[in-house]
Image (tube, helix red, strand yellow):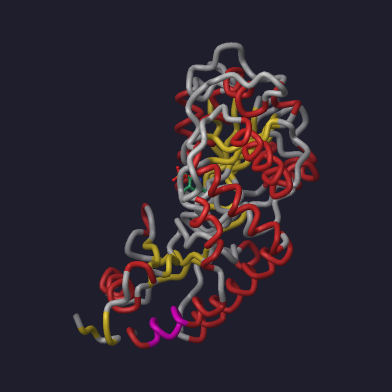
Amino acid sequence: MPTTAGSTPPLSDRILMGPGPCNPYPEAVAALGRPMLGHLDPDFLAILDETNDRLRQVWQTKNRLTFPVSATGSAGMEICLVNVIEPGDPVVIGVNGVFGGRMVDVAERCGAEVIPVEAEWGQPIDPSQLLEAHPNPKLIGVVHAETSTGARTDLAELGANKGDALLLADCVTSLGGIPVEIDNWGVDLAYSGTQKCLGVAPGLAPVTVSDRARSFIVERPRSWYLDLNLISNYVDGEGARAYHHTAPISMIFSLHAGLGALLDEGLEAAWARHEACGQRLREGLVELGFTLFAAEDHRLPQLTTVEVPDGVDEAAIRSSLLRDYGIEIGGGLGAYAGKVWRIGCMGHTARLRNVELLLAALKNLL
Ligand code: PLP
């Protein structure tokens, strides 16, 4: 059907510039079609081991317990909390958007006594407020890259001053797009998702757990599926690998290939590509008269938030972008629904040509 832009682009050409999923790397897509193997087949286990090695490189950690949980990023959040938190444990959590709020909810369901430390949406969390919120917390949890606002909260100062607390970082939107230094920064537990800057389909939650955090794992976590005592035999068994659940084989093939593409490019080159896209997008949006939303020194290159100008029908613009140009961008969440757009440049989508196309399309539509 003819449209203002000519014709509706086919679905296979969709440019995914929302907050996630992004377009996966072609290598990750191709790997989904690899012949199926059994979950205890030695050839599959070799690929799982190599995937975990690749994850260690991307997380910049030596943590032995590093693997993809068989579920989305939220399961990464749950596995990190349900294994170490016991009822009554004091837990400090930074809340500056939707995902910090979700972390509070999960921690409360584990029975934690949660002390939330809030910051305005779009602002980072002040590390000193997190460190001063409780004299002896069991865990401090924070979202490194808050996808609802596009703001980065820095982790190094927290890791350096956490004392006896465990430091938990949500790296769903950061891993692969900006530096994440688990060991250097002293992060004890971290989780991500495959669908963002790792450039793979949604469905797995890479996690990494330090040896110190492993010593906190409770004997009988309140989840069977996410019990690290049971899972670690399967994902990390040396020699005797025991069945725990049937691993999502094709997704692990895909993650293995996506991480291969990322590491072939090089982490620094991939971060620089994300940075260049974020910078050009911000510049172009400002040239078009937009106001950027997130705090200036804490803007994520992979997720730009921008205020919708007064009088603009934001849903109509997003719909035209999708129908006429085949470009998806995201709307705001919570109090910012209808007020901001969230524009992702993640994984394989983070290409300057996609940024230029979006800017040209926005210029036409406005
Ligand atoms: N944490 C952050 C920062 C996220 O952006 C998301 C998803 O967008 C999640 C957690 C939850 O991940 P999932 O939707 O894959 O379960």
- Residue at 36 percent across and 55 percent down: it is 335
Tell how many labels.
Answer: 0
Quadrant hosting residue 258? bottom right
Q: Is residue 217 above or below residue 19?
A: above
In the figure, 197 relative to 321: above or below? above
Q: Position of residue 176 (x, y in %)?
A: 63, 56
- Residue 133 visible in the picture: no
Residue 70 % position (x, y): 50, 35
Viewer can see residue 224: yes
Q: Is residue 218 above or below residue 130?
A: above
Q: Is 256 placed above or below 178 here? A: above
Q: Is residue 145 left or right of residue 5?
A: right
Is the stretch drawn in magenta largely helix, strand or loop? helix
Q: Is residue 361 magenta?
A: yes
Magenta-colored stretch includes residue 110: no
Coordinates of residue 188 in the picture (x, y in percent): 70, 34
- Residue at 48% of width from left, 40% of height from top? 36
User: Residue 348, located in which quarter of the rendered image?
Assistant: bottom right
Q: Position of residue 114 (x, y in %)?
A: 53, 29
In the image, 11 versus 351, the foreground residue is 11
Stretch of the chain drawn in magenta: 357-363
- The residue at the far top in this view is 219
Left or right, 149 with reference to 43: left
**Residue at the spot 69% in from the left edge and 64% down from the top edge:** 265
Quarter of the figure with the C terminus:
bottom left
- Quadrant occupied by the N terminus: bottom left
Q: Is residue 272 left or right of residue 38?
A: right
Judged from this view, the residue extending furthest toward the left is 1
170 relative to 154 in the view: left or right: left
